[in-house]
């Protein structure tokens, strides 16, 4: 699986050396790959080069036919479709955890030194988060939340947020998975404002812990996980953010939430469903090129 542009000529030379003997497939995992990234802090590469490089692509696009040629076999599938058992088990173990936060936002590893302006902060749309916090921390909503990876690793400096959020919003350093799950288990929903994100793992991790999403409708990947009213709510921009925020708060601040995110995951994603789907896709298109060990039923992307 090729998840990102080649890092240099050596990577490309290795690909060309082995491409006739090994089945290479592309998978959307890094920014907008295989499309050009809109991130001004990211390396520039030609999308047409990667769109036609592989015989198949696991993508996150709403309209793949607008980008890939007919010779490229495609499937709507992301790395975040796989490896969800840890989140499911953690969520089940902490199902009765008291909800002390309304939301959790995962910032990846924010550019704290530049006050959250840079590659990671652009990818996680932190400029929008600041706008959203003005609304969320207002007296109208009085939201509590956690901004993960919004403080430097020494814990001495955090990115600036509205003063109205003082005492309501916790800012943390970068967290390991267990610590992150701990915060998530105490939250009512996960906040995903990002656009430039091909495979937002936090989306399926939250759903696997039975936590709904408040998601940007313009997100490049992960939109397929959001069924309004069932797994969370969409918003488009600040014009409808209040409405969506009010809806998810009203639905999660009492004990009769209509959302069923865990049920959605168990029916559609995880290794059992996605591994079988990937195996069928590969077998259907390249059975003559691959020797599957006897009894193979699932394929899992390495590192997913």
Image (cartoon, rainbow, N blue to C red):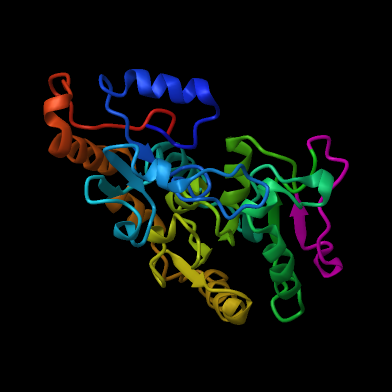
Q: Position of residue 6 (x, y in %)?
A: 50, 31
Q: Residue at position x 51%, y 42% from top? A: 30
Q: Can the viewer see residue 205?
A: no
The part of the image, by quadrant, that contains residue 146 is bottom right
Q: Is residue 143 above or below residue 274?
A: below
Image quarter where the C terminus lies is top left
Tell whether position 155 is magenta.
Answer: yes
Q: Residue at position x 16%, y 20% from top? A: 291
Q: Residue at position x 49%, y 70% from top? A: 234
Dominant secondary structure (helix, strand or loop) of the stretch shown in magenta: loop
Q: Position of residue 141 (x, y in %)?
A: 69, 77
268 to the left or right of 148: left
211 to the left or right of 182: left
Q: How many marks?
A: 0
Q: Which of the pair 122/11 is nearer the observer? A: 11
Q: Is residue 225 above or below residue 92?
A: below
Q: Which of the pair 176/92 is nearer the observer? A: 176
Q: Which residues are magenta?
A: 153-171
Q: Residue at position x 27%, y 52% from top? A: 267
Q: Can the viewer see residue 45?
A: yes
Q: Position of residue 4 (x, y in %)?
A: 48, 37
């Amino acid at each position: 699986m090729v998840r990102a542009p080649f890092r240099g000529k050596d990577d490309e030379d290795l690909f060309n050396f082995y491409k006739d003997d090994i089945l290479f497939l592309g998978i959307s995992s890094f920014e907008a790959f295989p499309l050009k990234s809109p991130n001004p802090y990211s390396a520039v590469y030609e999308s047409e080069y990667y769109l036609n490089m592989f015989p198949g692509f696991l993508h996150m696009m709403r309209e793949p036919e607008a980008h890939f040629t007919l010779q490229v076999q495609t499937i709507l599938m992301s790395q975040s479709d796989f490896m969800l058992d840890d989140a499911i088990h953690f969520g089940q173990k902490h199902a009765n955890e008291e909800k002390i936060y309304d939301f959790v936002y995962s910032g990846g590893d924010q550019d704290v030194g530049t006050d959250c302006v840079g590659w990671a902060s652009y990818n996680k749309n932190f400029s929008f988060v600041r706008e959203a916090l003005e609304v969320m921390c207002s007296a109208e909503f009085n939201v509590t939340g956690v901004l993960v990876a919004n403080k430097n690793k020494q814990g001495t400096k955090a990115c600036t947020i509205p003063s109205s959020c003082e005492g309501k919003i916790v800012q943390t350093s970068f967290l390991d998975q267990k610590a992150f799950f701990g915060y998530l288990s105490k939250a009512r929903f996960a906040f995903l404002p990002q656009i430039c994100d091909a495979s937002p793992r936090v989306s399926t991790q939250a759903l696997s812990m039975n936590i709904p999403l408040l998601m940007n409708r313009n997100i490049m990947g992960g939109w397929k996980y959001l069924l309004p009213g069932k797994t969370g709510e969409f918003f488009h921009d600040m014009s409808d953010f209040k409405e969506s925020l009010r809806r998810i708060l009203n639905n999660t601040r009492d004990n009769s939430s209509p959302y069923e995110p865990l049920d959605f995951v168990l029916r559609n994603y995880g290794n059992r469903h996605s591994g079988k789907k990937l195996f069928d896709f590969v077998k259907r298109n390249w059975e003559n090129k691959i020797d599957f060990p006897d009894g193979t039923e699932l394929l899992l992307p390495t590192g997913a």
